[in-house]
Image (tube, rainbow, N blue to C red):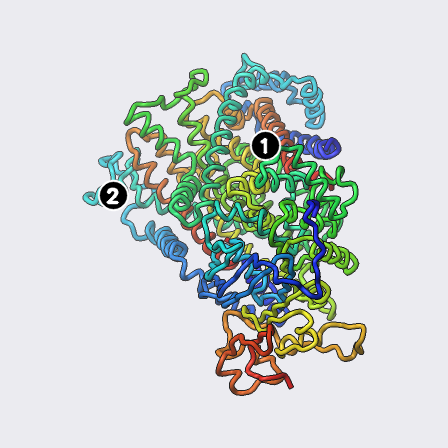
Amino acid sequence: MGFLTQRRDRQLAAMQAAGRTVGRSLWQDALRRFRSNKAAMGSVFVLAFISLMAIFAPMLSPHTLEDFYWEYILVPPTLENGHWFGTDANGRDMFVRTFYGARVSLTIGVMTTAVALLIGVTWGSVAGYFGGRIDNIMMRIVDVLYALPLLFFIIILVTVFGRNIYLVFIGIGAVEWLTMSRIVRGQTLSVKQKEYVEAARAIGLSNLVIVRRHVVPNIIGPVIVFVTLLIPTTILVESYLSFLGLGVQEPMTSWGTLISQGAASIDTGPWLLVIPGTFLAITLFCFNFIGDGLRDALDPEGR
Amino acid sequence: MLSFISRRLAIAVPTLLVVIAGSFFLMRAAPGGPFDADAQLEPEVIENLRAAYDLDKPVMEQFLLYMARLLRGDFGPSITYTDYTVTELLAIGLPVSVKLGLTATAVALLFGCLMGIFAALYRNRWIDYVTMSIAMTGFAVPAFVVAPVLTLVFGLYLKLLPISGWNDGALQNMVLPVIALALPQIAILSRLTRGSMLEVMRQNYIRTARAKGLPEYKVVAGHALKAVSLPLVSYLGPAIAGIMTGSVIIEQIFGLPGMGRYFIQGALSRDYPLVMGTVVVYATAIILLNLLADVIYGYLDPRVRRE
Amino acid sequence: MATGSVEKRARVAPAAEPATVLECRDLNVHFDTPDGRIAAVNGISFDLKRGRCLGIVGESGSGKSQTFLGILGLLASNGHAVGSVKLHGEEILNVPRRRLDAIRGEKLAIVFQDSITGLTPHKRIGEQLSEVLTEHRGLGRTAARAKVLEMLELVRIPEAEKRFRMYPHEFSGGMRQRVMVAQALLCQPDVLIADEPTTALDVTVQAQILKLFKGLADHTNTALVMITHDLGVVAGLCDEVMVMYAGRVVEHAAVDELFYAPRHPYTRGLLACMPRADRDSEALTAIPGQPPDLAALPAGCAFAPRCPYAFERCEAERPTLSLAAPGHARACHLEALP
């Protein structure tokens, strides 16, 4: 679609130069496209449902995380005795544990992504906006960090300093910001070179105004897309650590912890692995569909 | 090309130093030590032990001593495996991890690339949908869920394959760990290949190649594939890191005597020399393989070499 | 070219009409987009004669490139071409890929505008050119190489031996464009389509490349299609000109006719935009308004919103292409321009 693409690019540049009124309709356009994406919209509802369950299920259930039912040990899922997802080897209710685990896993996913977002956007936009030597040094640092086995660092960090959930936040966040910073830098650099930013500079707008009006609206799309893809990654890293016994500790639990316990009793109680594993998979699926949907909606020419 | 490689090497060496120093001081900075768990030991025994492992000296001196030994290829004695030096333990673990990792990498590259290319060529047809669903599943179902399920199905129910053990790397012992390890990378690689392929096939030079009257397979093989492989080569570094971290968990699940097991056990029991040894080997491998990826990239893209 | 059948073409008084090489009838090109179908080219017809040069002039988005991409089967995947295109009397539009591959590069060759992205960046120039010959002529490596070197010298690329082993990014823009021309000429095609071959180049290099085309047009039997937005390019080179606007031909005439007696307001507008030595530079004017949006064309004449002479009929009814004088067609409701 060579000629149409070119045409739309030029229109876009013209629109953006014209001001923010057209910008809003671009977002409306994106929203419309996103709404018509069935996989993405379905994922939004499923995620909303899982989140609501994560908040309310542990509150409303008659069981708690630490109720031991000695008469119900390793009972498979059933509707009869009130343990819908069965019980584990200690006779604890898996329904409550699964959604309590969801609460912890989702929280960690969102919080660590926030940490990564903060570091990554700051680093990337500073490097991209100032360019030159500053950019060179900052991105070299990212290159060096990229080459490191950072997950091993987290493992050392966690084993040495104790298995603290906040350490997990910071550790994962501090590792996962690298890609974010590269994306933001790339976007900032390319936006900076667009005609409308040069025009804005030519008419004497200050750096801050240019950043707020032209750079931020342009990098926000890719950043949103990346965030929706980063949340599942951080959930996965947390599960990985918890699986190794290095993340969330008893009596708290997360999907990774549950999966780890399930894997240990895979022959006697496969549901202990399958149920939290399925919820983890569904959640990762949903975030990915939403991420893909957002990318298609925000960048219709892309894929 | 030679100056290109030497420039990359000039970054690689300090990077490795940063890793070694970082992990060394990180571990020493924490309260407690490797002998905390042994409550029955007399204080003077612990003192002797600490002296034996140089732990009574100032941290900086310990570091210099360690570096001096490392340069001679000596990783020091293990604290938990009292009869072994770390070098001996690594000699047991490294071949296992290397064999597992390389096989998984090869499997992932083969399947990932093929699936991605076909998905792109048959975009929005059933091949595309099937491969992308597999890719999605591979991404959403992590290795530590796949691995136990695989053992349950193929080991416990069907009794086709052994559920654990290494057995000197026999084929039937390798199958399940390799699948579990390769699956997430297949997922990422196939999506990456598909995206890259779609991007490249939109380029003007593909249109030129078609305008020359080349049949489509020659257009793809001769003019697209090299460019398609560029993002894959850049992903090779992260992919290798991913397979290494994945293999830590896979070795744990399948009870394989690889590096990952020593790393986790070392970390849990504060076996400083063992952890350092594994970290040094992992970091060297990752840095060297990244270097290799850079060189391949430079070879494929003539523009990079000259900069 | 290098063969013995070189004949100097008589430009002034053709003894007999040369044979028709390419015959295009009622060609339409449309694209299916998420926002609906966009008609990029509507009802184009023309004949291309042996050794002649046809100029296609229009702004970007007028459909001039898409016409020929459609003929060559090179449209984007959501594009479709409908109509009839005959090469030596044989239908070539929408034929199977295998048949198309035998024609493209061999009988119909094209030079694209953008030589930076138009050549494969990671392949040596020599390989890219040689494969045309190995594909169509079945030549071996050495034979192809000799022929490529000959062609590179013909398009005046110095040190062809050395350049043969270089990559596209090691060439200057003008040199790359010469390579593109050489690539298109390797099989001595019956039709050479040049899609804005000089747009991306400096003015001096433009002149050199145009000279190259002129040499070709004068010394070979290859029919040339020159797609451009620049009437100046057409003036020195072409025999016939088609002016396109919003996917339609608005005027079609011999080059002298068109320049001295334009019969469509758009053509006149284009001519007025052209800087000329014999005119005051103050007389330079631009056509007011914007090129039309193909997704939202008016019901009547697409040019009406920008036309100084538009009247009611222009907005209601689309003018069709009709002869205003012998060999001079235009699509306008005006009998004659005021």
Q: Quadrant of the C terminus of chain C?
A: bottom right
Disc 2 residue type (three-letter) = His
x and y percentages locating residue B186 in the rendered image: 46, 37
Mark 1 highlights which residue? B31
Is residue A144 something that shows in the picture? no
Q: Chain of mark 2?
A: A
x and y percentages locating residue A192 in the rendered image: 68, 59
As drawn, is C44 to the left or to the right of C211? left
Q: Is residue A208 above or below residue A274?
A: below
Q: Residue at x 48, y 35 (%)?
A: A246
- Using the numbered discs, state the Cα–Cα distance from disc 1 to disc 2 in whole angstroms: 43 Å
Judge by depth and name the residue closer to the eye, B80 or B67. B67
Judge by depth and name the residue closer to the eye, C140 or B49. C140
As drawn, is B58 to the left or to the right of B128? right
Q: Are marks 1 and 2 in contact (CB under 8 Å)?
A: no
Disc 1 residue type (three-letter) = Pro
Q: Secondary structure at mark 1?
A: loop
Mark 2 highlights which residue? A83
Toward the front, the furthest residue is C15
